[in-house]
Amino acid sequence: AMTLGSLAALRGKHFGAGIDVGQLGDVPYTTVLDREFTAVTPTDAMKWDATEPMRNQFNYTYGDRIVAYARQRDMTVQGHTLVWHSQVPAWVQSLDPTRLREAMIYHIDRLATHYRGAVRAWTVVNEPLDGTGGYRTSFFYQRLGASYIADAFRAARAADPGAKLYISESDAEGFGAKSTGLYNLVRSLLAEGVPVDGVAFQGHMAAGQVPGGVAQNFQRFADLGLDVVISELDVRVQQPRTAAKDAQQAADYTTMVRACLTVPRCAGVTLWTFSDKYSKIPYSFPSQGSATPWDVNIQPKPAYTAIYNTLLGG
Ligand code: G3I
């Protein structure tokens, strides 16, 4: 029987799941993971707080487990994430600019070197913009200025010349101030020769609120010579779940997956996560949830069938 992964592969794309090590002993869950997905992204295992909790003391245990799991199953790994303002240990945030730049470059160098050959693509810089499309005033930006972005990409390329290097943003799927800010940023990075290979559109959606023009927006980035991916797709619904909301959610998943199919440079789609059992939406959006295509009992919802049919060509 065909699966989401095998159908996407026929279109030349990966179909991935965000996963964490604690989930890998859950047999009903891994049965679906192994059957349906051709790619994984560690949702937390490769972040700075997990990999370098103390300066110069690296811990690759969880990331290595995910890499080993994926390798045994011929899944690709999307590395996530080298530079982000969140889930960064306190010691990083207390550094002066000179030391912060050194620490950032060293962190990137160690991670990308350790996972050289194991990671298909890295989220090098995650969420650098604010809602207006200007630079987010993170501590990286405040202490290092915008040049931290170019520095991060150059360090990642030097450490792993074979990995695709992506910039990732939320809320940039449609046309608007943020996606235009992102477009202008990547265009100027490319003009300066910064090694950016692609843009990861996260795809955190609220049901019924998928913007129009997603494929056209993706295409303008592709026209710069970049890959695009949907890297963290979920579609949250106001609780409680109903049949009508399931149907809306299924339509929204269809819209997003179809956008990737429409754009030849779209390399794939990754779900964040694939089961409501592990989705953290209810923690970040109180009263919302049920955001994934499989329910808390790992049973498929209408969104699963919708994605399947979309990949099949419907
Ligand atoms: O690892 C600690 C553990 O030691 C501790 O006992 C436990 C107690 O709460 O927390 C654990 O850390 C949690 C971590 O997930 C691992 O489970 C954090 O509290 C929790 O905040 C963290 O949430 C992650 C979130 O990023 C943090 O911002 C989610 O799993 C992860 O899915 C989410 O992913 C982000 C992407 O990386 C970037 N884009 C947005 C997206 C959704 O927020």
Image: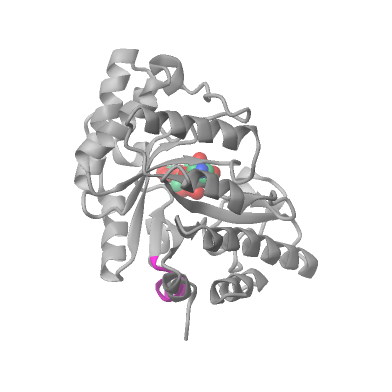
Vertical arrangement, residue 199 with respect to residue 302, above or below? above
Reply above or below: 78 against 12.
Answer: above
Q: Is residue 202 visible?
A: no
The residue located at (55%, 64%) in the rendering is 275
Q: Position of residue 78 (x, y in %)?
A: 36, 53
Task: Point out the stretch of residues depicted in magenta.
Answer: 28-38
Q: Residue furthest bottom?
A: 1
Residue 181 visible in the snapshot: yes
Where residue 208 appears, as percent x and y from the top left, is: 74, 55
Q: How is the image coloured?
A: one colour
Q: Quadrant of residue 254?
A: bottom right
Residue 37 on the magenta span: yes
- Tell me residue 209's x, y (percent): 72, 50
Q: Is residue 244 left or right of residue 162?
A: right
Pick the front one: 10 or 117? 10
* Residue in front for this viewpoint, 310 or 3: 310
Q: Residue at x 76, y 60 (%)?
A: 240
Q: Compared with residue 286, is residue 233 higher up or lower down, i.e. above or below?
A: below
Instruction: Identify which residue, 57 or 131, lies in the foreground.
Output: 131
